[in-house]
C-alpha cells in the first residue's frame, strides 16, 4: 500500500517528485549517508565521533537517536549514491514489520480467526500516523514496531514465559529509538493493566505479573545504558528549541482524524486505522460474546487514552514533558494500536452478530456526523467511509449467517477475506495518496534525491581534500548537513543534539543558523577559515562546484599566551573581536557609525574605514537584505521568524571605496527592525591576515594525525604556552601533553592544552559522556538477566523431576 501510493503519486523512487519533506532530506538521509561512510571506512570519524560536522562533534548519541535500529545497517548494502533508496526500503520494511508484529501480538493475546488478525495487522501497519508522521521520520517507525512487541512482552509477563526474550525485546527497541520506545513503554503498561483488570487472575498473580513486566523493562533499558545514558547527557548539553504551545483541536477535528482521507500536517492526531478496524472496534461494546468486565475496562482504556491527547499535562507526559513545536501528536500511534487491540477483542471472542454490527455502524455514523464540520476532511471522504463500512458490515454479516448453517465455510470465508483485503488496500492507499498530496502543498521538499549534480560535488570535494592537513568546507547550500551528505569537514550540522556550546561559539564568531539554533550554517569568511584550518572551500556557481584553496594554519597551533576575552558592552556579539581573539591577531577595523531609519523600514549606516579594505556586516537574528551603496544586495537571514527560527550570518558587502566612506543600506522588507547595534560593521585587512597565518604556520604543529575519535599533534621543539586545537571544546575530550593527563581548557569555544614539561606532542581522545557508566550498568543488567534465567531454569528442572 505504501509503495502503491508512491507509484500513484510519482514520488521517489517511482518518479521525479521528491519524498524529502522537511527533516527527511535535511537530516535523516545525510545521517544515513554518514553511517554508510563509517561502515565503509570512508568517514572522517567513527561511531563515537564525527570530524566532518560542526568542526568536530560527538556522533554516538546521534547514532542512538537517529540510527539506532539494527535495520539502519541495511543502508551499507546499497551504493552510496542510492542511500535515498535505502531509506525508502528501510521505511517500507519497518511498516511491514509493524504489521507482522501486531498480527503476532493479537494472536498471542487471544486465539481467533487468523485472517482477521492479519487484516488488523495490516490496518495498523498503514495507520494514519505511520503514513502521515512516521514515513517521513524513519526513526519513529521503530516505535510503531515496538508497540505490538511490548504487547507481546505484556502477554509473556501474564504467562510467566520468555523472561530473557522479554528483556532483549525491550533492549532492542529502546536502542532503536528511545523517544517512541518511551511512548510505547507506557502504552504497553496501559495494555497490561487492561488485560489484568479484565482477567480472572487473583490479585497476587496480577501483582506478580506487574512486577515481572517492570523488571523486564528495567533490565532491558539497563542493557542499552551505554548508548541511552550518553543520549541523556548529550541532550542536556544540546541546543534547546523553544517548547511548543499545546492547543487541543476541536472535537470535530479530533474525531475526523479517525476517518479516511483526512490530513492535518502534524497539527492534529493521526488516528486513522482504516474503516474496517475502526468499525470492528466499535462493535466491541455491543458484542454479547465479550464479557462485561472486558467491555468496561477496554472502553475506559480507549476513552481515557484519547482524553490524554486533549489535556496539556498528559500530552506533555507522552512527549517526556517537552511539548514539541511540530507534529504535536507524536504519540498517536499508541491509540491506533489500542484501537486495533479492541477490534481483535470483539472478533476473537466470536465474530460480532447483526446487533453488534449495527451498533458499531451506528457509532461510526455518529462519529461521521460529529466530524462533518472538520476542515481536514478531504473530497470523497464520505464515499470512502460509506463504501468501506457497508462492505465490512455485509461481509461480516454474511459470514455470521453462513456459520449458523451447516456446510463448507472455507470458500465463503476466503471470498470475504479477499473482498475485505481489497477494501482495506484501496482505502488505505487512497488515504496515503491524499495525505502525501496535501502535505506536498504545505511543506516543500527540502532536498532532491542523489543526482548527477550531487555526484559532481562529492567528487570535487574528495579531489580537493587533504584531511587532516586542512579542512575542506562543502558549505550548506543543499542541506545544513552537507558535510555528511557530500563530504569534507565543515561548519554545517543539523541535529537535535547539537551542543549548545558549539552553537553559541559559532554564533559569536558570525555564523548563521536555522532550526532554533540546532542547524549551523557555513560562514564564507577568510578569518574563520584560518581559525578552523579550512584550506579548501566549495562554492556553487549555477549549481556547479568550484573549489578555491588558501594557505591556512594547521589544525593545531601554538600560542605563547591566550588572549583574554574581548570585552563587549554592546547589544550584539562582537564577532570581529571574537575572531581576532581566536586568531591571535588584529585583522579588523571596527568603526563607529551613524544610523538613519526611514519610514519604509530601511536603515542606512555610515562609517569610515581604510580604503580598499573589505566591509563586512554582522546583524544576527534579523531578516532582510543589505548592500554597500550602489552594490549588489546580499540576503540576511530568512524572514521566517528571524531571531527565533533563523539567524543571519556575517556577510561580505564589498570593497571600501577610495574615499573610505562605508555606506551600508539595509532593507528589512515587511519585518521592520530597530537600528543595528554597535560593532555591526567590520572592515577586514587581508594583509594582516596573511601575516597572522604565516606566523601560525611557522609555530604550529609540524604533523597532525587524526583517528576516528582521537587526535595527535607533533609540535616544533621548544614550543611553549598553549596548544590550540581548531575543534570545539565539548564534554568528553581528554588530552595528554608532557606526560600530564588533563581536560582541555575552553579558549573561546576551542580546545586549548597547556604545554608543560617541554611537551612536543599533544594527544587527545574523545569518549562520549556517560559511556563508561553505561557500560557498567549494562554489565550489571547482563548479570541480573542471566541470574533470573538461571533461577528459572533450576525451578523448571525441579518441577520436571
Image (tube, rainbow, N blue to C red):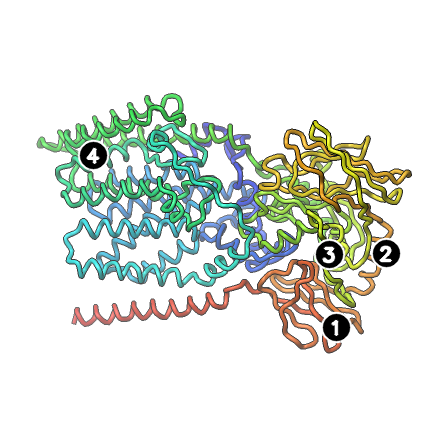
Residue 462 visible within the image: no
Judging by the rendered image, the residue that carries numbered circle 1 is: 760
Can you tell which quarter of the image residue 261 is in? top left
Neighbours of disc 1 within 10 Å: few (<14), some (14-19), many (20+): some
Q: Position of residue 633 (x, y in %)?
A: 75, 32
Q: Position of residue 415 (x, y in %)?
A: 23, 30
Which one is in front in this view, the residue at disc 3 or the one at disc 4?
A: 3
For the point 43% across and 32% down, the residue is 264
- How far across and how far down the image is residue 120, in percent? 29, 38
| Image-based side of 236 in relation to 311, left or right | right
Residue receiving disc 4 = 283
Mark 1 and mark 3 lie on one chain; the one further toward the N terminus is: 3
- Tell me how far mark 4 sits from mark 2, CA to CA: 81 Å
Q: Residue at x 33, y 27 (%)?
A: 371
Q: Is residue 41 above or below residue 743?
A: above
Task: Give the SS element for disc 4.
Answer: helix
Query: Could you tell me how far apart the alpha carbons at marks 1 and 3 are, in whole angstroms?
Result: 33 Å
Mark 3, secondary structure of its residue: loop
Q: From the viewer's perspective, tell me whether residue 247 is left or right of residue 441.
A: left
Q: Residue at x 18, y 37 (%)?
A: 285
Q: Nearer the viewer, mark 4 or mark 2?
A: 2
Q: Which residue is mark 3?
A: 567
Where residue 228 sits, quadrant-wise, is bottom left
Q: Is residue 647 left or right of residue 435?
A: right
Mark 1 against mark 3, which lies toward the viewer?
3
For image coordinates 16% across by 56% down, the residue present is 201
Residue contact between numbered discs 1 and 3, judged by CB atoms under 8 Å: no
Query: In front here: 680 or 3?
Result: 680
Q: Point out which mark residue 691 bears.
A: 2
Lower position in the chain sequence, tag 3 or tag 2: 3
Question: Residue 696 at what x, y percent from top left?
Answer: 80, 61
Amino acid at each position: 500500500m505504501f509503495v502503491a501510493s508512491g507509484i500513484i503519486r510519482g514520488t521517489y523512487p517511482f518518479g521525479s517528485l521528491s519524498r524529502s519533506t522537511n527533516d527527511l532530506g535535511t537530516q535523516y538521509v545525510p545521517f544515513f549517508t554518514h553511517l554508510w561512510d563509517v561502515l565503509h571506512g570512508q568517514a572522517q570519524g567513527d561511531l563515537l565521533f564525527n570530524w566532518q560536522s560542526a568542526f568536530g562533534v560527538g556522533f554516538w548519541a546521534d547514532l542512538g537517536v537517529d540510527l539506532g535500529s539494527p535495520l539502519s545497517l541495511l543502508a551499507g548494502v546499497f551504493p552510496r549514491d542510492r542511500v535515498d533508496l535505502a531509506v525508502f526500503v528501510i521505511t517500507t520494511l519497518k511498516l511491514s514489520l509493524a504489521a507482522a508484529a501486531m498480527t503476532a501480538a493479537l494472536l498471542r493475546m487471544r486465539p481467533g480467526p487468523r485472517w482477521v488478525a492479519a487484516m488488523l495487522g495490516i490496518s495498523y501497519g498503514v495507520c494514519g500516523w505511520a503514513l502521515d508522521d512516521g514515513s517521513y521520520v524513519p526513526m519513529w517507525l521503530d516505535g510503531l514496531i515496538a508497540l505490538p512487541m511490548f504487547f507481546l512482552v505484556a502477554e509473556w509477563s501474564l504467562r510467566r514465559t520468555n523472561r530473557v526474550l522479554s528483556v532483549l525485546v525491550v533492549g532492542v527497541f529502546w536502542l532503536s529509538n528511545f523517544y517512541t520506545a518511551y511512548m510505547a513503554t507506557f502504552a504497553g503498561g496501559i495494555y497490561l493493566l487492561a488485560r489484568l483488570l479484565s482477567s480472572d487472575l487473583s490479585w497476587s498473580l496480577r501483582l506478580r505479573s506487574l512486577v515481572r513486566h517492570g523488571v523486564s523493562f528495567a533490565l532491558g533499558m539497563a542493557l542499552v545504558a551505554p548508548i541511552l545514558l550518553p543520549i541523556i547527557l548529550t541532550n542536556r548539553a544540546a541546543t534547546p528549541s523553544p517548547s511548543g504551545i499545546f492547543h487541543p483541536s476541536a472535537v470535530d477535528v479530533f474525531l475526523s482524524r479517525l476517518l479516511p482521507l483526512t490530513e492535518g500536517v502534524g497539527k492534529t492526531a493521526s488516528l486513522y486505522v482504516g474503516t474496517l478496524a475502526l468499525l470492528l472496534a466499535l462493535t466491541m461494546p455491543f458484542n454479547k460474546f465479550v464479557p462485561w468486565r472486558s467491555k468496561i475496562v477496554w472502553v475506559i482504556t480507549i476513552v481515557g487514552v484519547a482524553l490524554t491527547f486533549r489535556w496539556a499535562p498528559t500530552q506533555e507526559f507522552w512527549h517526556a514533558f517537552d511539548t514539541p513545536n511540530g507534529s504535536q501528536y507524536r504519540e498517536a500511534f499508541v491509540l491506533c494500536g489500542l484501537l486495533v487491540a479492541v477490534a481483535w477483542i470483539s472478533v476473537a471472542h466470536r465474530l460480532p452478530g447483526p446487533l453488534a454490527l449495527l451498533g458499531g455502524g451506528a457509532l461510526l455514523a455518529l462519529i461521521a456526523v460529529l466530524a462533518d464540520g472538520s476542515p481536514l476532511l478531504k473530497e470523497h471522504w464520505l464515499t470512502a467511509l460509506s463504501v468501506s463500512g457497508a462492505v465490512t458490515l455485509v461481509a461480516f454479516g454474511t459470514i455470521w449467517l453462513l456459520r449458523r448453517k451447516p456446510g463448507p465455510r472455507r470458500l465463503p470465508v476466503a471470498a470475504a477475506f479477499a473482498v475485505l483485503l481489497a477494501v482495506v488496500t484501496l482505502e488505505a492507499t487512497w488515504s496515503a495518496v491524499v495525505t502525501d498530496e496535501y502535505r506536498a502543498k504545505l511543506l516543500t521538499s527540502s532536498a532532491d534525491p542523489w543526482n548527477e549534480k550531487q555526484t559532481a560535488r562529492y567528487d570535487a570535494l574528495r579531489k580537493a581534500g587533504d584531511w587532516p592537513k586542512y579542512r575542506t568546507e562543502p558549505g550548506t547550500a543543499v542541506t545544513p548537513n552537507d558535510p555528511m551528505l557530500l563530504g569534507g569537514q565543515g561548519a554545517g550540522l543539523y541535529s537535535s543534539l547539537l551542543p549548545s556550546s558549539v552553537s553559541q561559539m559559532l554564533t559569536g564568531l558570525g555564523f548563521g543558523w536555522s532550526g532554533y539554533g540546532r542547524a549551523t550554517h557555513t560562514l564564507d569568511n577568510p578569518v574563520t577559515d584560518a581559525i578552523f584550518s579550512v584550506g579548501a572551500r566549495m562554492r556553487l556557481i549555477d549549481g556547479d562546484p568550484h573549489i578555491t584553496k588558501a594557505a591556512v594554519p594547521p589544525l593545531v597551533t601554538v600560542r605563547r599566551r591566550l588572549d583574554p576575552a574581548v570585552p563587549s558592552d554592546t547589544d550584539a556579539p562582537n564577532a570581529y573581536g571574537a575572531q581576532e581573539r581566536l586568531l591571535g591577531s588584529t585583522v579588523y577595523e571596527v568603526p563607529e557609525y551613524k544610523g538613519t531609519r526611514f519610514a519604509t523600514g530601511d536603515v542606512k549606516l555610515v562609517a569610515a574605514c581604510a580604503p580598499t579594505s573589505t566591509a563586512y556586516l554582522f546583524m544576527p537574528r534579523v531578516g532582510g537584505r543589505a548592500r554597500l551603496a550602489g552594490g549588489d544586495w546580499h540576503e540576511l537571514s530568512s524572514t521566517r521568524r528571524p531571531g527565533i527560527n533563523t539567524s543571519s550570518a556575517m556577510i561580505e558587502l564589498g570593497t571600501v571605496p577610495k574615499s573610505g566612506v562605508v555606506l551600508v543600506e539595509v532593507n528589512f522588507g515587511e519585518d521592520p527592525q530597530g537600528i543595528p547595534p554597535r560593532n555591526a560593521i567590520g572592515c577586514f585587512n587581508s594583509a594582516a591576515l596573511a601575516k597572522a597565518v604565516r606566523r601560525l604556520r611557522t609555530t604550529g604543529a609540524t604533523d597532525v594525525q587524526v583517528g576516528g575519535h582521537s587526535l595527535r599533534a607533533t609540535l616544533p621543539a621548544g614550543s611553549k604556552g598553549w596548544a590550540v586545537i581548531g575543534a570545539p571544546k565539548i564534554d568528553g575530550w581528554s588530552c595528554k601533553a608532557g606526560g600530564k593527563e588533563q581536560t582541555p581548557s575552553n579558549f573561546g569555544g576551542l580546545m586549548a592544552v597547556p604545554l608543560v614539561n617541554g611537551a612536543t606532542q599533544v594527544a587527545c581522545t574523545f569518549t562520549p559522556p556517560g559511556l563508561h557508566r553505561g557500560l557498567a550498568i549494562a554489565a550489571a543488567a547482563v548479570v541480573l538477566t542471566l541470574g533470573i534465567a538461571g533461577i528459572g531454569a533450576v525451578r523448571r528442572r525441579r518441577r520436571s523431576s
